[in-house]
Image (cartoon, rainbow, N blue to C red):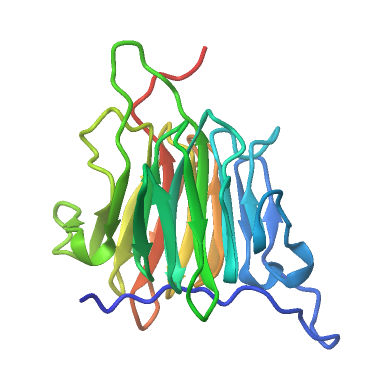
Amino acid sequence: MSNSQYFSQVGGLPPQTQTLSSKAVFKTAYAVIPKTVMSDIVTSVLPHREETRAWIIARPLSGFAETFAQYIMEVKPGGGSVRPEPDARASAAIFVVEGEGTITYVGRDYLLRTGSFAYLPAGAKWAFRNESAAPIRFHWVRKAFKVVDGLEPPPAIFTHEDDCVMHAMPDTEGRWATTRFIDPSDVRYDMHLNIVTFEPGAIIPFMETHVMEHGLYVLEGKAVYRLNEDWVEVEAGDYMWLRAFCPQACYAGGPGRFRYLLYKDVNRHPDL
């Protein structure tokens, strides 16, 4: 078993004594949505869902995310949906940060718990329910799947972080590593959802700049993160969106590990 921790305490409302200063920022190249923003008043209630609310932290929008939408979902006991996905083009990646729930896919039930990952292909018929005595919270990434002629559709994936290998980046002595839920060599998939882990003092030692759009949700710890021309302090519960080619770097200076859930689009030609 891993010693992983995942931030999940969204919701509530800041007191009237709360100051208005915030690191929330929305720019052309990146955005930072801190955990203090994710209160009760910014939730969404979605069709065909019972006892469920969502924090939508990324969506396709001019000047913002282009390839995906990302939600933090909270489903209370007895809640769920028999038709959660309204768009047949959308594939789904799910990562559970707290609680238990069940996905029904192709007539089979899959129990998800804290640390579980699921990938549901585009057009899949699936359902979700929470039969436990406590709420479940999970990240749900939706992406319009890019079909490739002559390439078969990707299969569903159900796994857990404990069952996945943490791959160290070369020449880092394991201080910077990635847990990959989807095989990076399998080009049938057009997105990845990974967990990136930095040990205290670890860095991204160059200004990483590339074609992949990123969504980063901090699961654990704190760091100073470079976003385009700015260094920003981030901690567990904060969310960052990075446009394609936005320069990024990281210094994990906290007393414990710094970990984030990373979305990126992969394995496809750019649309012209």
Along the line of sight, which residue is nearer the eye, 152 or 232?
A: 152
Q: What is the x, y in percent for residue 145?
A: 46, 28
Along the line of sight, which residue is nearer the eye, 84 or 207?
A: 84
Residue 180 vs 14, above or below: the answer is: above
Q: What is the x, y in percent for residue 149?
A: 35, 11
Residue located at (27% from left, 63% from top)? 161
In this rendering, position of residue 88 left or right of residue 101: right
Q: Residue furthest right?
A: 16
Residue located at (53% from left, 80% from top)? 134
Residue 220 vs 245, above or below: the answer is: below
Q: How many marks?
A: 0
Along the line of sight, which residue is nearer the eye, 175 or 102?
A: 102
Along the line of sight, which residue is nearer the eye, 163 or 64?
A: 163
Q: Residue furthest front?
A: 107
Please say whether residue 11 is visible from this viewpoint. Answer: yes
In this rendering, position of residue 245 left or right of residue 55: left
Please say whether residue 229 is visible from this viewpoint. Answer: no
* Residue 73 location, quadrant: bottom right
Residue located at (50% from left, 72% from top)? 236
Q: What is the x, y in percent for residue 59?
A: 64, 42
* Residue 240 location, quadrant: bottom right
Residue located at (29% from left, 21% from top)? 152
